[in-house]
Amino acid sequence: MAQYVPPSNEMEFAHADTKPTSPWKPIFRIVRWSTYAAAILTLILALHKTPPPLVKTSPQAAARAEQKFDEAERAVANGQPTTLRVDQTELNSYLSSHLEVSGREAARAASAASRKDDSNDSAPTAQDVEQMRSNVRDFKIQLVDDRVKAYVLFEVHGKDMTLQLEGRLSAQNGYLILDPVSGQIGSLPIPQSALESAVRRLMESPENREKLRLPPQIADLRIENGEVVASYR
């Protein structure tokens, strides 16, 4: 009969050397992949272009807006206070026509600059004109009750992106003020606190402060019943 050999201590307690798996390891793995997924989703939403709003424009509406501006200027020149009202169609038509004119002027300037002699240092070069071109590709304005909703299509490093901003306009101490209500980049909503902070920094920066200064003859500017209302003193 074979003699019984008791197991050695090494075999008996071999399982004691095996370390138990930490319960935090799968949790960390889940958190890490969730962070990656959230970052990818955020990027996709930010790069997803939202379609522009359906806004009507026409040459006739642009002409009406131009006439209203001229009448307001004549009234101010004669020392008469007046109120200017421009609706959504007139405003977008006016902006669209002037943006097209600016684009044509930039193209003509670039063509003229390319034909200039390189020795003429005072003439703008094609690179100078290119730097002056705006990255804005499209711009639409909606006037809803007492709010303005802006849609901007712009280019960043060759990629088209969209920005939507909604808020209330007012005039304060001779400057244009925007009280933001909501905003989003692409399909990604901007948190309200971040939106308010960004708009405040933008409007208080020295380079933008003077751009927001209203003409001295404008006493008030607001959105009322879906119209831009400017009060001239």
Image: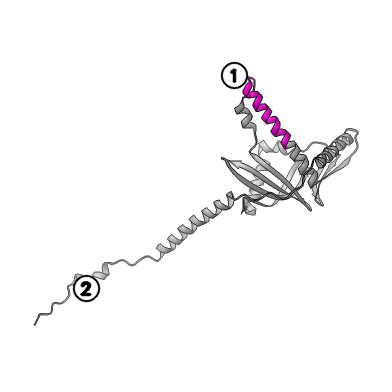
Q: Residue furthest bottom?
A: 1
Q: Residue furthest top?
A: 119
Tell me which segment is drawn in magenta.
99-125
Which element type, helix, strand or loop, lies under badge 1? loop
Quadrant placement of the C terminus = top right
Tell which of 13 and 74 is nearer to you: 74
Inspect the magenta stretch and tell me whether residue 103 lies in it.
Answer: yes
Q: Earlier in the sequence, mark 2 or mark 1?
A: 2
Above or below: residue 132 compared with residue 59: above
Mark 2 against mark 1, which lies toward the viewer?
1
Tell which of 130 and 14 is nearer to you: 130
Which amino acid lies under the numbered mark 2 shown in the image of this protein? Glu
Name the magenta segment's main secondary structure: helix
Mark 2 neighbour density, 10 Å: few (under 14) some (14–19) many (20 or more): few
Which amino acid lies under the numbered mark 1 shown in the image of this protein? Asp
Residue drawn at point x = 60 percent, y = 28 percent: 127
Asked if residue 172 shows in the view, the reply is: no
Above or below: residue 132 compared with residue 42: above
Image x and y of residue 84, in percent: 85, 42
Between the residue at mark 2 and the residue at mark 1, the CA separation in whole angstroms equals: 91 Å
Give the left or right position of residue 180, taking residue 11 as reference: right
Image x and y of residue 187, in percent: 62, 53
Instruction: Name the residue that disc number 2 marks.
Output: 12
Residue drawn at point x = 89 percent, y = 39 percent: 81
Asked if residue 20 shows in the view, the reply is: yes
Quadrant placement of the N terminus = bottom left
Residue drawn at point x = 52 percent, y = 56 percent: 38
Q: Quadrant of residue 107?
A: top right
Instruction: Name the residue that disc number 1 marks.
Output: 118
Inspect the magenta stretch and tell me whether residue 105 lies in it.
Answer: yes
